[in-house]
Image (cartoon, rainbow, N blue to C red):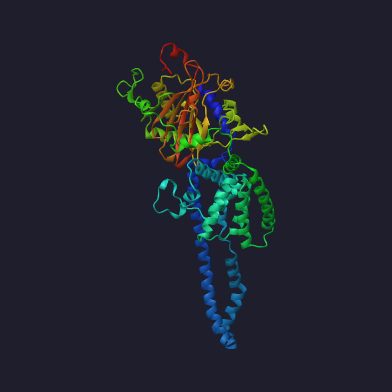
């Protein structure tokens, strides 16, 4: 596909989607919210000053009249015996009190309300708030953080004294629990309701949430996980605070009945059955079979390469067979893994180039569309046009549902749109020795709150022969992944089948082949982007296709497996 056709494909995507949709998973664009909120605060303070000025005028008028009325009412007849006083009383009541009424009725909020109304169209929605809450829970699970660590703002131990704006209040914890409850995620409901209750018990106050409401959620969420005894305990605590609570009184009888039945069953269970029942409680499994392995790699707890294999990994100056561009100034190349061969190139783009790419991408950032997590099927160009979010088949209903396992914003940049993009594309071709004339446009992605991309393949598999049919360029032979920011914590690229973990480093690019020389997919390249724990992750991808590589392969210009 020509660069022009690629541009048409992506233009259709960007012009057919609403800028409002899925706006707030990108820190790159969430910064706009901070400045918008700053403007609203300034507008609010202007309104407060206007109200204070109005009240000051009313106060001066009231003080003046109070003194006058006090003197006048001591000797009303003598006061009104003065014709000037009589005239001024009539004038005040006929004119000045009407003017005062107009001043009192004057709405000083018009400017602020107008500004607020205009900006409200850019506010996050309920879905955005839910997404942010689920992102916190994703980080909690992946990095095994307890609720207290998150609530007190001690992520990654960055602060010895936590700023107040980084802490979660009772209300915040309660709202997180409610989000989990709305998703029937009773595991996280329990964790966050317990944290809210703990903070209330420690003396924190709330004008909207009380212990009764929290205990109500706690007892039900624990019951849904099979914890009958604890559910009964929470219900009893609730009834101590509110003996007339109708639902709790009903639950008390039900839990006691169920518990008596459970004791009879437990008496007949052997140890293995009891163990299995207890293990079934807690966090539920999902569609991702390698969830535990993936999360361990994100925590740097994965497979370790043996010292013998590590000794075969080298750093070198690389000139790609004495390529004219690199004879004098070779590229710094580092082996990240041996099988499959994953290499990192250092200092391959400048700060100025990265900033320009971000600048070009920011106005276009949309929620990424991805491959099916059940089948691994990749989206085609047409799929990318027609879907803003990935859709997958529910394994139980067979219906298409929205996929939530990629949380990032992506934009596509064609070479002709700016010289910097063209320069980067040419540099990729010079370094890799691959023909990029049939490669996809440069994809720029920004991972924000809890941003991640769960395990997937970049290439189309045998059971999806039409994955890239519309492009007419064959399969994705190789992946070039450029890191355009450092990340304070999290955000590693991990390869789940081999145990490799590659940490983001600004200005470096990671490269690997997705296909063997035979054209078969290399299933060891299954990889994922770990959630960003702290910071802001910018990357750009170049997916290079088979078409155009035949001549280079015949001439021995391609690196072997």
Q: Image height check: is 104 above or below 404?
A: below
Asked whether residue 310 appears in the rendered view, the answer is yes
Q: Nearer the viewer, residue 176 or 349?
A: 176
Percent x, y for residue 512?
44, 24
**Label tally:** 0
- Residue 556 in which image quadrant: top left
Q: Nearer the viewer, residue 94 or 515?
A: 515
Residue drawn 49% across and 32% down? Answer: 528
Residue drawn 37% across and 35% down? Answer: 351
Percent x, y for residue 399?
67, 33
- Residue 95 in which image quadrant: bottom right
**Is 155 left, or right, of 127 in this rendering?**
left
Percent x, y for residue 248?
66, 57
Percent x, y for residue 136?
52, 45
Q: Nearer the viewer, residue 62 or 452?
A: 452
Q: Quadrant of the C terminus?
A: top left
List the single residue furthest toward the top: 554
Q: Nearer the viewer, residue 370 or 147?
A: 147
Asked whether residue 172 appears in the rendered view, the answer is no
């Amino acid at each position: 596909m020509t660069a022009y056709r690629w541009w048409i494909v992506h233009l259709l995507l960007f012009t057919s989607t609403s800028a409002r949709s899925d706006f707030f998973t990108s820190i790159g664009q969430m910064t706009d919210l901070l400045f918008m909120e700053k403007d609203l605060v300034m507008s609010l303070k202007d309104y407060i000053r206007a109200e204070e000025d109005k009240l000051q005028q009313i106060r001066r008028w009231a003080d003046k009249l109070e003194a006058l009325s006090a003197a006048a009412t001591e000797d009303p007849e003598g006061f009104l015996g003065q014709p000037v006083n009589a005239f001024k009383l009539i004038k005040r009541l006929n004119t000045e009190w009407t003017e005062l009424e107009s001043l009192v009725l004057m709405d000083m909020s018009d400017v602020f309300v107008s500004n607020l109304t205009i900006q409200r169209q850019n506010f996050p929605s309920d879905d955005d708030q839910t997404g942010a809450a689920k992102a916190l829970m994703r980080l909690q699970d992946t990095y095994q953080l307890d609720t207290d660590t998150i609530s007190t703002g001690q992520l990654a131990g960055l602060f010895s004294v936590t700023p107040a704006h980084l802490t979660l209040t009772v209300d915040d914890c309660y709202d997180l629990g409610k989000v989990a409850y709305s998703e029937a995620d009773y595991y996280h409901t329990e964790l966050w309701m317990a944290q809210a209750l703990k903070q209330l018990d420690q003396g924190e106050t709330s004008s909207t949430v009380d212990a009764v409401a929290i205990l109500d959620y706690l007892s039900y969420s624990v019951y849904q996980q099979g914890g009958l005894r604890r559910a009964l305990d929470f219900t009893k605590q609730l009834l101590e605070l509110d003996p007339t609570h109708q639902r709790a009184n009903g639950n008390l009888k039900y839990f006691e009945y169920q518990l008596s039945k459970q004791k009879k069953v437990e008496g007949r269970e052997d140890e293995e059955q009891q163990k299995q029942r207890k293990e079934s409680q807690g966090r539920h499994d999902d569609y991702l079979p390698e969830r535990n392995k993936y999360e361990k790699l994100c925590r740097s707890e994965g497979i370790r390469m043996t010292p013998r294999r590590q000794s075969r990994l080298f750093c070198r100056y690389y000139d790609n067979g004495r390529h004219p561009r690199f004879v004098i100034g070779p590229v710094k190349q580092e082996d990240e893994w041996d099988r499959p061969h994953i290499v990192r190139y250092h200092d391959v783009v400048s700060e100025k180039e990265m900033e320009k790419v971000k600048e070009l991408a920011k106005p276009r950032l949309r929620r990424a569309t991805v491959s099916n997590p059940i089948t691994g099927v990749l989206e085609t160009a047409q799929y990318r046009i027609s879907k803003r979010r990935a859709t997958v088949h529910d394994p139980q209903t067979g219906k298409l549902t929205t996929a939530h396992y990629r949380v990032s914003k992506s934009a596509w940049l064609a070479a002709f749109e700016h010289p910097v993009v063209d320069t980067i594309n040419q540099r990729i071709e010079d370094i890799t020795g691959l023909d990029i004339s049939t490669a996809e446009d440069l994809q720029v992605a920004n991972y924000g709150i809890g941003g991640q991309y769960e395990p997937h393949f970049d290439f189309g598999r045998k059971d999806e022969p039409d994955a890239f049919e519309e492009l007419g360029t064959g399969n994705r032979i190789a992946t070039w992944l450029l890191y355009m920011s450092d990340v304070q914590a999290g955000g590693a690229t991990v390869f789940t089948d081999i145990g490799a973990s590659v940490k983001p480093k600004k200005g470096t690019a990671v490269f690997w082949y997705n296909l063997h020389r035979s054209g078969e997919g290399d299933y060891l390249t299954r990889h994922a982007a770990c959630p960003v724990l702290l910071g802001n992750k910018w990357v750009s991808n170049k997916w290079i296709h088979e078409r155009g590589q035949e001549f280079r392969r015949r001439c021995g210009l391609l690196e072997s497996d």
